[in-house]
Amino acid sequence: MATVRSLSSRLSRFALYECTADLSHLSTHEHVALKKLVKAGKYLDQLYMRQAWSGNEALRKKLHAEGNKELCTLFEMYKGPWACEDDNVPFVDGVPKRPEGGNFYPEGMKKDEFEAWVSTLSKEDAETAKSYYTVIEKNEQGDFQSVPYSQTYADLLKPAAEYIREAAQELKKVEMSGEGVRIDEFLSSRADSFESNEYLTSELNWLRLGKFNKLEVTVGPYEQYTDAMFSLKSAFEFYIHVRDDDSSKLLEKFSDLQFVEDHLPIPEKYRNSELVAAPIVVVNQLYASGDVAVPMTAAYNLPNDEVAIKKGGSKLVLIKNVQEGKFDKVLKPIASQVLAHDQLQHLTKDAFTTHVLLHEVCHSNGPHHTLDGHTVRSKLQEYHSALEEAKADIAALFAADLMVDRGTIDNVTQKEFWVTFLASAFRSIRFGIQEAHGLGQAIQLNYLVEKGGFQCDEKTRLFSVDFEKIQSAVSDLTRDILILQGDGDKKAVDDFVKKYGVLDQDTKDALDRIDHAGIPVDIRPIYPLDN
């Protein structure tokens, strides 16, 4: 049971993995810049702790003062006192239930209170209240008010900005040329954003970073998972990567969004008419902080800000060394416990990493606005993240099938994609179905079982792919999710999630086998750069 896990057993669920790469090709200035960036990352890590829960910073100090190493390691790993893969059960005594809206809203504020207040505001003020970059507080009169991140977090953003500017100064000394923005230009503009609360300019600089840059840095307020109440407020995260140019060139052929869009199994009115091909960067991770709790991110497609996407598109970052760690230490052992033995031959690392890549690409596909003109996020609210993750997953599987037929993908077969996807479903569900990726994966697994694409043998209790039915099942699920998003009918989505977003007995039994076999839930990083 989740509630009786010891601290050591929790730690053992995440296999240590060293995140590093060959840095011998970097200049002295780039090495100095890396140290400055890590210092900035420490401030942004504390900032995210504050965003996640009002009591996080004080509890962090208390735990480190008491000196229980296991407890401190867990707290840093989860970025708080709750174990996400165990339905956010607390592992520290005396803490409250994880706040649904993080620390972005007044404590105890209800959804209807926020919505009622927003309805009284002017259009401009309502947009500010729902902005990615504001928190909601109560003023001295007890009324709600919107406060920009630059003001609320000034004590942490200002020193972080200074270290980022110092890193930029070092990188200015590096000789580099080519098409696109230099990384020092991006970092300088991002530091300015921390103090102005205007993120569009620096976001466009990040999107236009030239391929000649050896380092790839992602820093700022991005994901909305911490705001599980509305999926409005963005959390600060920070990644330092070194680019893998050879792999980036190899994978650029998968960025043909229009080909995928044109073949999606949906009526024309649901298609995305404003697609921008996402550039793809393959990297190796050197350091991360902020909104980077386990499970480790293996790829991301940013930004999420619809205004920035409309002006500059999005960029896909695939983290090669993290992906390899997940496959070797987690997915292969899971497959041995849940897959029919005659299908294990179809489990491959290339199928896993290519599907993750396509997942990120496919976030751009399909409707981002409902048929009546609202953003899908604003209409589906707390369901948006889970349904969006499910959309990207299943659309990626649909796209993989197309690309194998087309010859764009020639190193992975359809059977390898389907079987590897099935094994990976259990990897994601282990993170808990209260988490967007886990819930999205549970929805897909149950739907595909209902359609006959996946099946569980009554005698062996092992899962397998029905190669005769899986193709149409994937197409049907892709269609259903995209139409739910395009319609923006929250009641229909609620019914869909309640029907499919559950764990049946076969799935629970498989998860128990995985757990009893001592297979890690995920990897947890060691960063040599941090030292």
Image (spheres, grey):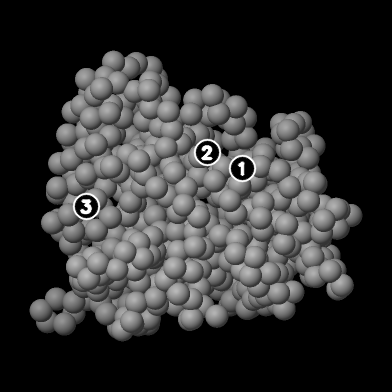
Binning the other alpha carbons within 10 Å of mark 3 as few (below 14), some (14 to 19) or many (20 upward) gives many
371 left or right, relative to 210: right
Q: Amino acid at mark 3?
A: Tyr
Asked if 64 appears above or below 410 in the picture, the reply is below
* Distance between the alpha carbons at the discs numbered 1 and 3: 32 Å
Of the image marks 2 and 1, the number of the one nearer the N terminus:
2
Judging depth in this view, the residue of 521 and 243 nearest the camera is 521
Residue at 48% x, 76% y: name it. Answer: 5
Quarter assignment of residue 69: bottom left
Quarter assignment of residue 76: bottom left
Whether tag 1 and tag 3 are in contact, CB under 8 A, the answer is no
The disc label shown at residue 353, or none: 1
Spot the residue most to the right.
468
Helix, strand, or loop for circle 2? helix
Residue 35 spot, x, y in % from top left: 24, 36
Question: Which residue is under mark 3?
Answer: 43
Of the image marks 1 and 3, the number of the one nearer the N terminus:
3
Question: Which residue is under mark 2?
Answer: 320
Asked if 181 appears above or below 322 in the picture, the reply is above
Whether tag 2 and tag 1 are in contact, CB under 8 A, the answer is yes
* Distance between the alpha carbons at the discs numbered 2 and 1: 8 Å
